[in-house]
Amino acid sequence: MSIALLHLDCTAQNKMAPATKETLTEVNERLDQLLLQLMDDLEVLKEKRENLNSLIEKGWFYLSQSRYSMGNKFVSSLQYKQDMVPSVCVQGSISEEGVTVFHVGNVESEKGEPEETQEVETIGAVDQVLRHRGHKSTTETPKHLKTEGNEKQRPPPNNDPLRWFGVLVPQSLRQAQNTFRQGILLTAEVASLQSGIDETRKQYRELLTDKHRLQSQSVCG
């Protein structure tokens, strides 16, 4: 009776399983590659998250120094402009493997010219954002965005948020601005890397399903 049930189960699996050209050995090799890639990406993600936390802590520390030297009333939300607009924006593009890559760029002004931003030091190597082999974005960075880190031009005085707090601001306030700008860039890298890790996990689970199916077919055969 048990042999008959096993035969019926194997027959049903053979009918339901889609045709595949990969052997069990090839699937195991791909699983090993994905696992190594996943461990490598997780290590990079941990490092970038630690750098991001460090930037946030430094930014708030510089702000506290500015408030100590200028006074709490002069470094607060009371100095925000009523019509303030963002100077940068984040836009994502989908790669061929389904990985979302995030880009930080300058916002286009009302005149059609991109707003200039201060030079921002890039944290970490750019090629470490996605460490997936063969991952190429199918959509380029929009033309109305300029990637930060490549532009060395400074914004006009009227568009610089530091001017909201006075003409002669302390160096600590400038350091806080620069630190938070670096954090924006690093946040985009972290989000892109996290998207790649999620896609790798998805591929790994799918390959595990294929492996179990191939093993069942070999037993039934």
Image (cartoon, rainbow, N blue to C red):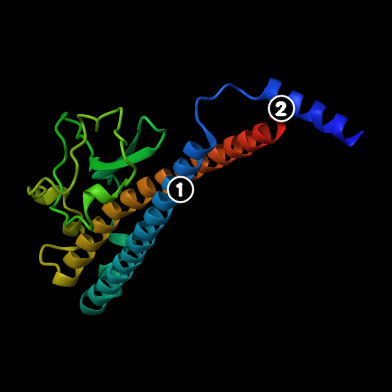
Q: Nearer the viewer, residue 98 or 104?
A: 98
> Which of the labelled discs sits on residue 138, or is there none?
none
Q: Are marks 1 and 2 in contact (CB under 8 Å)?
A: no
Residue type at mark 2 is Gln
In this picture, residue 54 sits left or right of residue 219: left
User: Which residue shows up at 42% across the image and 56% down it?
Assistant: 39
User: Which residue shows up at 37% across the image and 48% down it?
Assistant: 193
Query: Which picture quadrant has residue 18?
Result: top right
Decide which of tag 1 and tag 2 comes sooner along the chain.
Answer: 2
Locate residue 5, reporting x and y percent.
86, 31
Residue 30 in view of the camera: yes
Q: Secondary structure at mark 2?
A: helix
Residue that badge 2 annotates: 13
Residue type at mark 1 is Asp
Q: Nearer the viewer, residue 102 or 47?
A: 47
Dot 2 crowding, Cα within 10 Å, few <14, some 14–19, many 20+? some
**Distance Cα–Cα, label 1 vs label 2:** 26 Å
> Which of the labelled discs sits on residue 32, or is there none?
1
Task: Name the image quarter holding the N terminus.
Answer: top right
